[in-house]
Image (cartoon, rainbow, N blue to C red):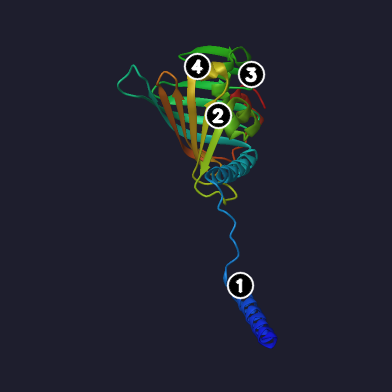
Amino acid sequence: MNAWLNIAGCKARKEFLYLGFALSIMLCANFAASPAQAAPPPSKAEATQDAKAMQNAAMERLFAELKKIPGIEATFKEEKHLQLLALPLESEGVLYFHQDGYLLRKINEPTPSSVRVTPTALIIEEGGKTQRMELASHEEVAHMVQSFLWILAGDLNALRTHFRLHFETADVSKKVPEDWTLTLTPTHAKVKKLLQKIVVQGDGVRVRKLRIEEQGGDVTETQILSVDTARSFSKEESKKLFGRAP
């Protein structure tokens, strides 16, 4: 009886060992066959944050290129859509920009006039009369007027100080973004009472379109046509166009 028990015990132990060995082989086979556990996909918030970071990086590259522009000369056409008028007011002219913070906007049609912006003042000439506005005394006007200069000058810090920026481009991998849109929403309390937002569209360092939406519903759309982004100005030209030699 004892001998049988010993034999049976040995047999059971062998079967147990065989079973354990078989299970080990199966587990190893399953482990080897199973793919490595993949990292969880990014959350929607993380994906959105990554996309925004790439867009912001593209915007930084664009503004770095804008800073290199010495000056601009371009023709434009403009439409003012006023709530009180059924048809828009149309005009066309030419603008000149100097990197030192000067802009001259001359309207040739339908009525000749000009708007000159300096780092400190806004000067309007129309019908032989001249009006001068000191920008330091009119912050809300200064931010609206100077926003376009800050874009052309590549002054991203100034824009970020006074606006909330939203930048979009079709291909964030481009060194200089193409087909881009920049939306500026004012953060200054006084400016917010007048201005809803500014939308700027461009291709590389060339601004193509500017849309200004006011709180009252009036909209101004400016199309920038022929553009020379390598324009330089002599002292004589600067004196004539901007009122001084920058």
Q: Regarding mark 3 in the picture, which secondary structure is present there?
A: loop
Task: For the N terminus, give its image quadrant.
Answer: bottom right
**Residue carrying label 1:** 27
**Amino acid type, residue under disc 2 in the picture:** Phe
Residue 80 visible in the picture: yes
Toward the viewer: 185 or 12?
Answer: 12
Q: Which mark is residue 148?
A: 2
Residue type at numbered disc 3: Thr
Q: Nearer the viewer, residue 23 or 225?
A: 23
Give the residue type that dot 4 points to.
Lys
The quadrant the C terminus occupies is: top right
Q: CA distance from mark 3 to mark 2?
A: 15 Å
| Real-space Cα separation, disc 4 to disc 2, in angstroms | 19 Å
Q: Quadrant of residue 217?
A: top left
Q: Residue at x 67, y 83 (%)?
A: 5
Q: Amino acid at mark 1?
A: Leu
Structural distance between the alpha carbons of marks 3 and 4? 22 Å
Q: Position of residue 130 (x, y in %)?
A: 53, 13
